[in-house]
Image (cartoon, helix red, strand yellow):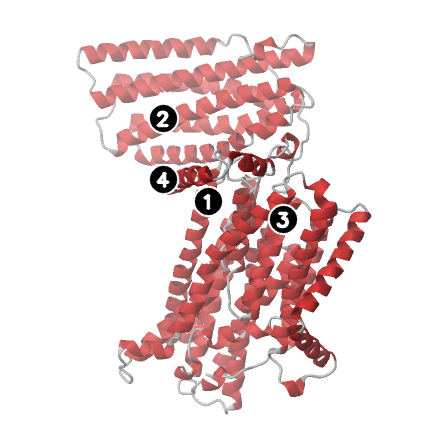
């Protein structure tokens, strides 16, 4: 068994590296989003500042490590084997959970994951021990094993940070925006210098001075020598001369800010970059315990057991783990280096940023989340409340305040998600809140803090206007719901995993390692498939000309028409043969087409805007093609839905003549699809006859079949369900035909216009 526990320590060490990687991928957005969203500098510059912050924060984080060892449970009530199984279960569950969230592109909390994994693992082992025939302890003894009060304090602190962060971000930034307005450039000489000094002074005090103080508290006074002793005396002087030090700090940054402004440099850029460094440092100082705290505690447990002479692991009490243990600085620096390498080389970090930026961006654009009744109710309530509340204020005052929250039209069209004023506020408020918690050794969630501060500042900036509020509120609620779900999943996974390890030991360990490898492989495949599917068509083009727009519509239309043709064919064959599997496959294929078309729909306004500086006619062409394609997709929606509904509910099958008519119609429709597909492939209409004879044949065939259906109803040959199904199939086939006909004619005319420069009045609505 000695070899078994040695193997577990090796596994814990390897898992800690993986946990650092997946943890950083999830949390990188917390300190990168403000700089990336405001485009303060190149990505390389932003990463350099973030890397320096991570390295320093990792070095200063040792004071938090005791949370992993004794923050959730009492080690004195567990044996060495129990402790090792708990730690191993926590690491395995945490890695799998975070990797799944990263692949899905959803931000979650590494702190919540770690705390609830510890709680779940300890709870599971404690219940097994208490219910064993040897102990047979009552349920209330669980409070001896689990530190319920401490766990509750941690949990309340984590979830209270949601409210505190949101309100802090909203109220503080409201006054900052009132001071600066959106035309802040003219106010940088005075207001900008003062805000810069306040921001940098607060971040410097909390992150540097308080951070060093937190680290030095882990040393005994006898162990302080040289520079450490000097720092301790310096910090003591600060405590006795707090206001003097704050004045010196503020004055220093005022001078620095004045120098930057006099040189013509936008001082807010420095604030955002310094804030990125500060928040990265706060992240590493507060969250490093989530990644390496468990493995370090496991190694410490193993050393205690080994120094005791390696007694039976199932009987060796781990009371010694409750003592204070200093983490070597080399371990912390090594962990920091792994996080920095992950930050630079992992592509998944870019995948997580979209949610927060999308919910907090100032400009209009596609909304990632749908509204729901709860979000609509919240928005309506606050609209009524605000209207009632502002009745108590003079209208002149409200008009004067409102001027500071109005953007120029040029500002609305910029590609940045928000400006430097909001970016600096996000970073300053988040850094201070996280640093306070770090000093108090309270593990809060950096994801909760940075996300909710960002939501609060976007609210006070009027980014959540009446056009987007219900979608943004719905998105925030969905993210918060995901955070609570994280705690539940983490608790359950760790509990089940710990019990599995407790009973099956080596076999369980091998099985779980295989599970981790399998999950990583599947997430890797899914991530790259998702990135490939989400590759945008228009991002690399600044100005769209008529010819480039035409080529892009060919690129968009070709795959859609191929899918629609296959969907139509399967729907007709499925309903005539009453093949439920074929109809379900057809419906699923349609839903994929609809999902892909949503991204095209979301980019409509941006694409039209890209045509304004070159040829506005290109935007009109794109709008026409978009409109006709949308109508074809809507018709396909009805066909796939109604055919599946008819068969899945076991309604009476179609009559022989109806089936025969539909199959003839299908052949004509496929022939028509082939004509438009040929145009999208060849990108010309030279070999296409106008008007296309097949179009008239389809319309004539549909009219004949509708007449037959009417006669069948008169003579009571067809029932109600049969009639409505046939009418839907015929009418939607007619709409598809007419829209394809319009697209072919549109391409014919636009290609003639490009070659001969003839009048483009045919594009008018």
Whichever of labels 3 and 2 marks the residue nearer the N terminus, that label is 3
**Mark 4 surroundings within 10 Å by alpha-carbon count, few (fewer than 14), some (14 through 19), many (20 or more):** few
**Mark 3 surroundings within 10 Å by alpha-carbon count, few (fewer than 14), some (14 through 19), many (20 or more):** many
Measure the C-alpha gap from mark 3 to mark 2. 46 Å
Camera-near label (1 vs 2) is: 1
Say which quadrant the N terminus sits in.
Answer: bottom left
Marker disc for residue 638: 2
**SS of the residue at dot 2?**
helix
Whichever of labels 1 and 2 marks the residue nearer the N terminus, that label is 1
Residue highlighted by disc 1: 475
Say left or right for 521 vs 716.
right
Residue 691 seen in this snapshot: yes
**SS of the residue at dot 1?**
helix
**SS of the residue at dot 3?**
helix
**SS of the residue at dot 4?**
helix
Residue highlighted by disc 3: 423
Q: Is residue 410 above or below residue 14?
A: above
């Amino acid at each position: 068994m000695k070899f078994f526990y040695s193997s577990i320590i090796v596994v814990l060490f390897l898992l800690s590296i993986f946990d650092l990687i997946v943890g950083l991928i999830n949390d990188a957005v917390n300190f990168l989003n403000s700089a990336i969203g405001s485009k303060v500098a190149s990505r390389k510059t932003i990463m350099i500042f973030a890397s320096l912050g991570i390295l320093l924060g990792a070095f200063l984080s040792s004071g938090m490590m005791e949370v992993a060892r004794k923050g959730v449970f009492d080690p004195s009530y567990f044996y060495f084997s129990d402790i090792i199984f708990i730690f191993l279960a926590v690491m395995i569950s945490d890695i799998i959970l975070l990797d799944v969230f990263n692949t899905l592109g959803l931000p979650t909390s590494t702190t919540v994951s770690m705390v609830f994994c510890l709680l779940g693992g300890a709870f599971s082992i404690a219940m097994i021990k208490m219910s064993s025939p040897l102990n047979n302890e009552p349920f209330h003894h669980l409070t001896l094993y689990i530190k319920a009060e401490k766990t509750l304090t941690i949990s309340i602190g984590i979830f209270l940070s949601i409210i505190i962060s949101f309100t802090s971000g909203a109220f503080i930034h409201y006054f900052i925006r009132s001071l600066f307005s959106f035309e802040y450039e003219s106010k940088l000489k005075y207001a900008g210098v003062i805000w810069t000094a306040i921001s940098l002074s607060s971040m410097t005090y909390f992150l540097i001075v308080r951070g060093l103080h937190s680290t030095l508290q882990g040393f005994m006074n006898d162990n302080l020598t040289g520079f450490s002793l000097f720092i301790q005396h310096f910090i003591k002087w600060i405590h006795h001369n707090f206001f003097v030090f704050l004045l010196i700090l503020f004055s220093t940054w005022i001078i620095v800010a004045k120098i930057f402004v006099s040189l013509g440099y936008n001082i807010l850029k420095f604030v955002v970059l310094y804030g990125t460094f500060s928040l990265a440092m706060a992240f590493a100082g507060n969250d490093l315990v989530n990644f390496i705290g468990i493995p370090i505690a496991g190694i410490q447990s193993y050393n205690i057991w080994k120094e005791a002479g390696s007694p039976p692991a199932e009987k060796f009490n781990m009371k010694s783990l409750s003592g204070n243990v200093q983490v070597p600085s080399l371990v912390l620096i090594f962990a920091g280096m792994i996080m920095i390498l992950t930050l630079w080389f992992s592509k998944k970090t870019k995948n997580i940023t979209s949610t927060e930026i999308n919910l907090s961006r100032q400009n209009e654009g596609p909304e990632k989340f749908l509204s729901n009744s709860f979000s609509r109710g919240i928005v309506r309530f606050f609209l009524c409340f605000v209207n009632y509340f502002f009745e108590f204020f003079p209208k002149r005052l409200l008009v004067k305040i409102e001027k500071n929250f109005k953007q120029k039209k040029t500002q609305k069209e910029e590609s940045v998600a928000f400006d430097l004023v909001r970016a600096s506020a996000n970073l300053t408020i988040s850094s201070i809140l996280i640093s306070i918690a770090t000093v108090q050794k309270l593990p809060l969630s950096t994801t909760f803090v940075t996300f909710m501060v960002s939501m609060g500042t976007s609210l006070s900036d009027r980014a959540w206007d009446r056009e987007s509020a219900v979608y943004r509120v719905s998105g925030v609620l969905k993210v918060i719901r995901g955070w609570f779900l994280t705690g539940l999943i983490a608790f359950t996974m760790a509990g089940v995993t710990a019990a599995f390890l407790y009973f099956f030991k080596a076999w369980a360990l091998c099985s779980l390692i295989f599970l981790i490898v399998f999950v990583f492989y599947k997430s890797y495949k899914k991530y790259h498939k998702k990135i490939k599917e989400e590759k945008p068509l228009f991002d690399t083009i600044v100005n769209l000309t008529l010819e480039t727009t035409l080529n892009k519509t060919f690129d968009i239309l070709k795959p859609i028409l191929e899918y629609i043709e296959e969907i139509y064919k399967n729907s007709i064959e499925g309903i005539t043969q009453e093949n439920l599997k074929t109809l379900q496959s057809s419906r699923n294929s349609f839903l994929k087409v609809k999902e892909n078309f949503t991204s095209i729909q979301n980019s409509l306004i941006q694409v039209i805007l890209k045509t304004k500086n070159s040829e506005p006619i290109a935007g009109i062409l794109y709008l026409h093609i978009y409109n006709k394609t949308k109508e074809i997709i809507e018709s396909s929606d009805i066909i796939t839905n109604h055919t599946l509904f008819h068969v899945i509910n076991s309604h009476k099958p179609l009559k022989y003549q109806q089936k025969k008519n539909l199959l003839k119609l299908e052949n004509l429709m496929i022939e028509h699809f082939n004509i438009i597909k040929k145009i999208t492939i060849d990108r010309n209409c030279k070999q296409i006859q106008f008007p296309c004879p097949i179009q008239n044949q389809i319309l004539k065939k549909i009219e004949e079949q509708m007449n037959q259906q009417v006669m069948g109803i008169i003579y009571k040959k067809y029932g109600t369900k049969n009639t409505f199904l046939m009418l839907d199939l015929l009418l939607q086939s007619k709409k598809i035909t007419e829209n394809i006909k319009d697209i072919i004619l549109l391409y014919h005319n636009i290609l003639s216009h490009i070659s001969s420069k003839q009048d483009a009045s045919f594009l008018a609505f």
